[in-house]
């Protein structure tokens, strides 16, 4: 059976709607219906009763759902076990990472990991949207912020500062900032994540705490684009320490408001379950901690 169809069947049951499932996966309802019909034909049973008002699982469907989940979990465990070759780190490491981190900093670290473990291969998914581990077929995700789903496994990589920065050309044209409230008079390059505009920048200094709502003529859901806008002098960026460390070191970007601290951000490596924590994941985790610690310190 097609494992994609099995995953799709589980998702339909969880959402209770073919239309909602199609929306979440960015496919047409007809494609979801076709996959369900294909699976039912293969099994020669009806899994779901579909009416104009509701979608209801059949008794046969409930029984298959239980075994379907077990089978997919068993296949994943088998894939991990098959990657272990004479105690060496091997197999395919399927990673989801944010765009800026993936296209720039992480790309060099992945090469170092592959050089150290020649039996290992990498499948890299780059984007700022949150991955669905099973449907997107990834083993782990490197993401900022705390883990909300307690059923998953999270490895803390580092806690780092947020940096307010701009290019020397922007500073030369618009002047230095002396206070967070001055941001209201500047073009602040904004990131949109999961439909939410991140336009409230926070600071704390000797004179108190400040939460400044900023504005911009440039907004993107891609953090790499935000960084490039900042480097090219289009405005001020508010990024994590790791995202702009190379540009700060080279002088392409300059840190602003050094007398004010912003709330730190956590970087975590997330796996859907303990079964996904393979020797390859552990090796990658340790490399991450080593590299990020060098940057933060």
Image (spheres, grey):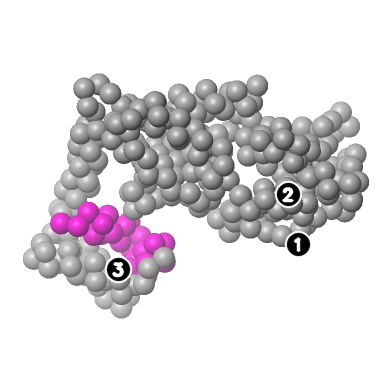
Ranked by sequence position, the earlier of labels 1 and 2 is 1
Near-viewer residue (79 or 225): 225
Ranked by sequence position, the earlier of labels 3 and 2 is 3
Q: Quadrant of the N terminus?
A: bottom left
Q: Kindly state the secondary structure of the residue where label 1 is placed.
A: loop
Can residue 84 be seen at all in this image of the molecule?
A: yes
Q: Residue at x 20, y 34 (%)?
A: 82
Residue 265: name its quadrant: top right
Ranked by sequence position, the earlier of labels 1 and 3 is 3
The residue at which mark 1 appears reads as: 217
- On residue 32, which mark appears? 3
Residue 14 located left or right of residue 208: left
- On residue 39, which mark appears? none
Residue 192: name its quadrant: bottom right
The residue at which mark 2 appears reads as: 230
Q: Kindly state the secondary structure of the residue where label 3 is placed.
A: helix
């Amino acid at each position: 059976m097609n494992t994609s169809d099995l995953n799709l069947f589980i998702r339909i049951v969880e959402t209770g709607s073919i239309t909602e499932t199609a929306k979440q996966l960015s496919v047409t309802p007809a494609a979801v219906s076709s996959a369900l019909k294909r699976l039912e034909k293969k099994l020669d049973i009806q899994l779901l009763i579909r009416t104009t008002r509701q979608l209801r699982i059949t008794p046969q469907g409930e029984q298959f759902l239980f075994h379907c989940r077990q089978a997919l979990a068993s296949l994943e465990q088998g894939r991990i076990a098959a990657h272990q070759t004479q105690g060496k780190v091997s197999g395919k490491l399927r990673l989801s990472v944010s765009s800026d981190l993936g296209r720039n900093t992480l790309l060099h670290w992945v090469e170092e990991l592959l050089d150290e473990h020649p039996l290992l291969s990498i499948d890299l998914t780059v984007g700022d949207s949150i991955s669905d581990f099973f449907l997107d077929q990834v083993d782990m995700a490197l993401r900022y912020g705390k883990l909300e789903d307690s059923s998953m496994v999270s490895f803390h990589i580092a806690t780092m500062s947020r940096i307010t920065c701009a290019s020397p050309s922007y500073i030369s044209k618009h002047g230095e900032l002396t206070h967070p409230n001055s941001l209201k008079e500047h073009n602040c390059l904004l990131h949109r994540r999961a439909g939410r505009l991140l336009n409230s920048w926070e600071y704390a200094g000797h004179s108190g705490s400040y939460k400044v709502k900023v504005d911009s003529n440039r907004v993107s859901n891609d953090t790499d684009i935000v960084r490039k806008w900042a480097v090219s002098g289009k405005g001020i960026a508010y990024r994590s320490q790791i995202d702009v460390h190379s540009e700060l070191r080279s002088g392409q970007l300059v840190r602003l408001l050094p007398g004010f601290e912003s709330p730190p951000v956590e970087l975590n490596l997330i796996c859907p379950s303990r079964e996904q924590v393979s020797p390859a994941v552990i090796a990658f985790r340790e490399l991450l901690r080593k590299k990020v610690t060098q940057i933060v310190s």
